[in-house]
């Protein structure tokens, strides 16, 4: 069996990483590892991890590496060698990227492509202001008016607005992205695996561009 794709989806909050991850996992049958979803599930369940992550998430800053790296790498390493995966929201700083590289290298693996979804700041703010996610499966939706707020199309779950999608936290998350996460673009460009995709357009158009880049 062919080796599955190993992807990192990279981009600011609101770039559409979650939405594109869903489309790509369906298309290529990949495992989806989302650090944000994992933290939110733990928060909902009131686990020690959720309690630890709560304040950092609410403020829009990164959960400390000591908490994050082990949890995510344990998930990544548990994926069968021949299966592909998408990492969504991880790595978010240089230390996380180095640890990921090291963990995959011990199993003679690496990331095939880092897909950078590039979205302008006004568009990010607009999208996050109208973003709701499913309580059950975490699927994201962007709505223009409350009338569009239906149950989740995937699982029928109730939609809610994330605490960190409120304006203050959004501003902080964009600053954190610029200062801590953006330097990773150089890191991955130097490794020759970065794919830049303009991301201000519709979900379908952005997906088409990503697929075209992955299947040249
Ligand atoms: P997201 O759903 O990816 O926007 O993540 C929501 C929040 O979870 C972030 O604002 C961080 O507080 C935390 N988080 C998610 N992924 C990471 C990560 N790789 N490192 C540190 N914190 C993270």
Image (cartoon, rainbow, N blue to C red):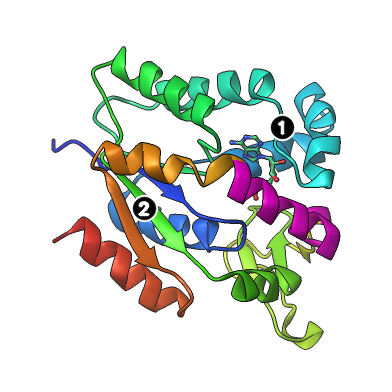
Give 2 or 62, whichever is nearer the viewer: 62
List x then y, in percent, for residue 52. 82, 26
* Residue 166 drawn above or below residue 193: below
List x then y, in percent, for residue 31. 41, 40
Q: Residue 63 bears which disc, if any?
A: 1
Q: Helix, strand, or loop for circle 2?
A: strand
| Side (left or right) of 38 relative to 21 | right
Figure label count = 2
List x then y, in percent, for residue 48. 81, 22
User: Residue lying furthest top in this view?
Assistant: 106
| Part of the protein shown in magenta | 163-179
Q: In which quarter of the image is ligand 1?
A: top right
Q: At x 43% / y 23%, what residue is drawn?
A: 98
Give 75 or 45, whichever is nearer the viewer: 75
Q: How far apart are marks 2 and 1 (CA)?
A: 23 Å
Q: Does the residue labelled 1 lie within 8 Å of ligand 1?
A: yes
Q: Helix, strand, or loop for circle 1?
A: loop
List the residue tagged with mark 2. 115
Q: Is mark 2 within 8 Å of ligand 1?
A: no
Quadrant location, the C terminus: bottom left
Q: At x 52% / y 24%, what residue is drawn?
A: 95
User: Counting residues from the N terminus, which is met first, the one under dot 2 or under dot 1?
Assistant: 1
């Amino acid at each position: 069996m062919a080796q599955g794709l190993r992807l990192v989806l990279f981009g600011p909050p609101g770039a559409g990483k979650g939405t594109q991850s869903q489309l790509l996992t369906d298309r290529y049958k990949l495992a989806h590892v989302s650090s944000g979803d994992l933290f939110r599930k733990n928060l909902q369940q009131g686990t020690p991890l959720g309690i630890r992550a709560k304040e950092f998430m609410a403020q829009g800053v990164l959960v400390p590496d000591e908490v994050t790296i082990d949890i995510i790498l344990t998930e990544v390493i548990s994926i069968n060698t021949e299966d592909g995966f998408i990492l969504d929201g991880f790595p978010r700083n240089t230390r996380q990227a180095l640890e990921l590289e090291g963990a995959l290298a011990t199993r003679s693996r690496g990331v095939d492509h880092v897909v950078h979804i590039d979205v302008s700041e006004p568009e990010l703010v607009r999208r996050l202001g109208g973003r709701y996610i499913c309580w059950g499966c975490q699927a994201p939706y962007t709505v223009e008016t409350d009338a569009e707020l239906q149950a989740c199309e995937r699982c029928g779950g109730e939609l809610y607005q994330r605490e960190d999608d409120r304006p203050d936290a959004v501003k902080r998350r964009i600053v954190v992205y610029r200062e801590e996460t953006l330097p990773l673009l150089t890191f991955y460009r130097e490794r020759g695996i970065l794919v830049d995709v303009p991301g201000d357009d519709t979900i379908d158009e952005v997906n088409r561009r990503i697929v075209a880049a992955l299947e040249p």
